[in-house]
Image (cartoon, helix red, strand yellow):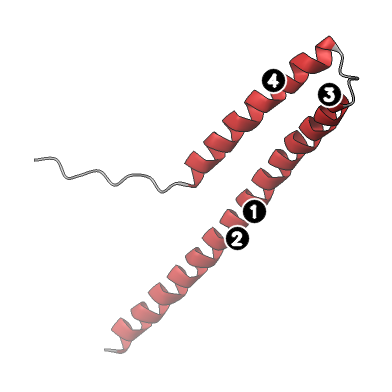
Amino acid sequence: MLRELGHAVRDGATEGARASYYREYDRGFNEAAQICMNVLSDTTAGLLAKMKAGNLSKPEQALYARLTELTAEMDERLQNACQPEPIEAPQP
């Protein structure tokens, strides 16, 4: 009986530690993702301001277009990375 109780306590502590680890991992992932998106957003916003002022060169226009594409692609990939993996149905 005491052995079973000891195993239950150990298993509970292990699960608690694992949950804490995953919370910290998720928080770090979210912070890193936000930093990356902010870098792209800030750069794109600067180019957009130049565009509105009529001071955007041809190379900067190409850069703006590419950054806009990269931002959308990164956002999609980050959203997909946060989705739980699908549970496969048992095979007959």
Residue at the spot 39% in from the left edge and 73% down from the top edge: 11
Q: Nearer the viewer, residue 44 or 78?
A: 44
User: At label 4, which amino acid type do we have?
Assistant: Arg
Residue 36: give x, y in percent of width and height. 71, 39
* Residue 8 image point, x, y percent: 35, 79
Q: Which residue is mark 2?
A: 24
Q: Check whether the beta carbons of the residues at disc 4 and disc 2 lie within 8 A of each other.
A: no
Q: Which residue is mark 1?
A: 28
Marks 2 and 1 sit apart, C-alpha to C-alpha, by 6 Å
Left or right: 92 in relation to 41: left
Q: Nearer the viewer, mark 4 or mark 2?
A: 4
Q: Are marks 1 and 3 in contact (CB under 8 Å)?
A: no
Residue identifier under label 4? 66
Q: Are marks 2 and 1 in contact (CB under 8 Å)?
A: yes
Q: Of label 4 and label 2, which has the lower sequence position?
A: 2
Q: Which dot marks residue 48? A: none
Between 78 and 29, the residue placed more toward the observer is: 78
Element assignment for label 2: helix
Q: Amino acid at mark 2?
A: Glu
Question: Looking at the image, which residue is at 90% across and 26% down?
Answer: 53
Residue at the far left: name it: 92
Q: Secondary structure at mark 4?
A: helix
Mark-to-mark CA distance, 4 and 2: 33 Å
- The CA span between labels 1 and 3 is 35 Å
Relative depth, front residue between 79 and 10: 79
Q: Which residue is label 3 attached to?
A: 51
Q: Residue furthest bottom?
A: 2
**Which element type, helix, strand or loop, lies under badge 1?**
helix
Helix, strand or loop under label 3: helix
Q: Which amino acid, mark 3?
A: Met
